Image (cartoon, rainbow, N blue to C red):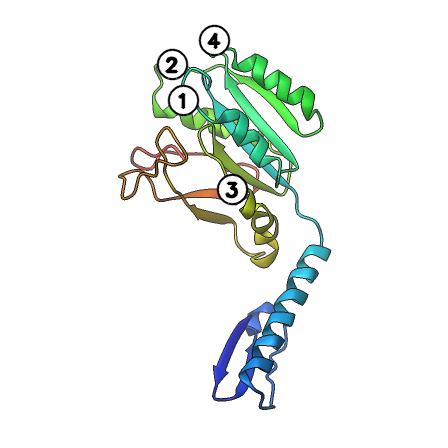
């Protein structure tokens, strides 16, 4: 929806290519009445999106020695449960830090959602190995949409509902890029203006054959 105010006349327009008829209100109203109308319309729209066909989401995570590297893997998985219908976790066969035991425990806790895989990787393969492992994890996703999570990333719970309805609001979109905030060693130590990536493609439509690649030095 595009809500356009011109004087006291409220116009509510939709694009023709959305196969929805254009309409526009021809009455004048107070500012308060206009905002109430908008508020009710937005509430109605969200309600309709939630009633429409449920779109399913897979989260996929790849890892190697996450406990040794002090990543947030367990919390990453638990946060992902808020918006995911399944969680794919691919751990390197070279992980020797007890992470397989941790992951097995989490799977026992959520047997219907968490799926575990082991990946045989070349430790000398550099970024190519990273992209191969991510692509392997992506290939195991079975739902409509897939969301990438590194084992040291988390999505705040307040964004869980937004993630669920984004594909409904923008049905023609194939990928969503999210902003990223970086912290070092603590959630209270924010790294402002760092040279790390500020945005990344996270949520993608599950088109079979999609793979990760390298752009510069970015394996995502």
- Residue where numbered disc 2 is placed: 123
Pick whichever of labels 4 and 2 is earlier in the sequence: 4
Residue 51 in the image: above or below residue 67: below
- Residue where numbered disc 1 is placed: 129
Please rate how many residues cluster around mark 2, counting C-alpha atoms within 10 Å: few if below 14, some from 14 to 19, many from 20.
Answer: few
Q: CA distance from mark 4 to mark 3?
A: 29 Å
- Residue where numbered disc 3 is placed: 156
Q: CA distance from mark 1 to mark 2?
A: 8 Å
Mark 3 against mark 2, which lies toward the viewer?
Answer: 3
Which numbered dot is residue 96? Answer: 4
Q: Are marks 4 and 1 in contact (CB under 8 Å)?
A: no
Residue 157 in the image: above or below residue 28: above
The residue under the point 52% across, 54% down is: 173
Mark 4 against mark 1, which lies toward the viewer?
Answer: 4
Pick whichever of labels 4 and 1 is earlier in the sequence: 4
Q: CA distance from mark 4 to mark 1?
A: 18 Å
Label 2 SS: loop
Pick whichever of labels 3 and 2 is earlier in the sequence: 2
Toward the viewer: 113 or 69?
69
Residue 1: name its quadrant. Answer: bottom right
Q: CA distance from mark 1 to mark 3?
A: 29 Å
Residue 118 in the image, given as x and y percentages of width and height:
55, 16
Q: Are marks 1 and 2 in contact (CB under 8 Å)?
A: yes
Mark 1 against mark 3, which lies toward the viewer?
Answer: 3
Question: Horizontally, is 33 left or right of 177 in the view?
Answer: right
């Amino acid at each position: 929806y595009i809500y356009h105010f011109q004087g006291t006349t409220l116009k509510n327009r939709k694009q023709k290519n959305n196969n929805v008829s254009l309409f526009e209100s021809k009455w004048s109203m107070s500012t308060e009445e206009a905002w109430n109308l908008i508020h009710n319309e937005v509430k109605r729209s969200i309600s309709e999106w939630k009633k429409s066909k449920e779109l399913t989401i897979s989260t996929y995570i790849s890892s190697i020695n996450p406990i040794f590297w002090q990543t947030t893997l367990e919390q990453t998985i638990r946060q992902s449960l808020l918006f995911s219908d399944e969680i794919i976790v691919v751990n390197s066969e070279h992980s020797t830090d007890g992470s397989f035991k941790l992951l097995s425990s989490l799977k026992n806790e959520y047997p219907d959602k968490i799926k575990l895989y082991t990946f045989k990787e070349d430790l000398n393969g550099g970024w190519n190995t990273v992209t191969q492992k991510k692509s392997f994890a992506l290939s195991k996703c079975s739902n409509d949409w897939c969301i990438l999570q590194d084992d040291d990333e988390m999505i705040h719970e307040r964004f869980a509902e937004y993630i669920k309805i984004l594909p409904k609001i923008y049905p023609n979109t194939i990928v969503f890029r999210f902003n990223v905030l970086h912290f070092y060693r603590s959630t209270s130590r924010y790294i402002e203006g760092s040279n790390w990536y500020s945005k990344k493609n996270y949520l993608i439509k599950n088109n079979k054959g999609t793979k990760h690649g390298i752009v510069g030095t970015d394996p995502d």
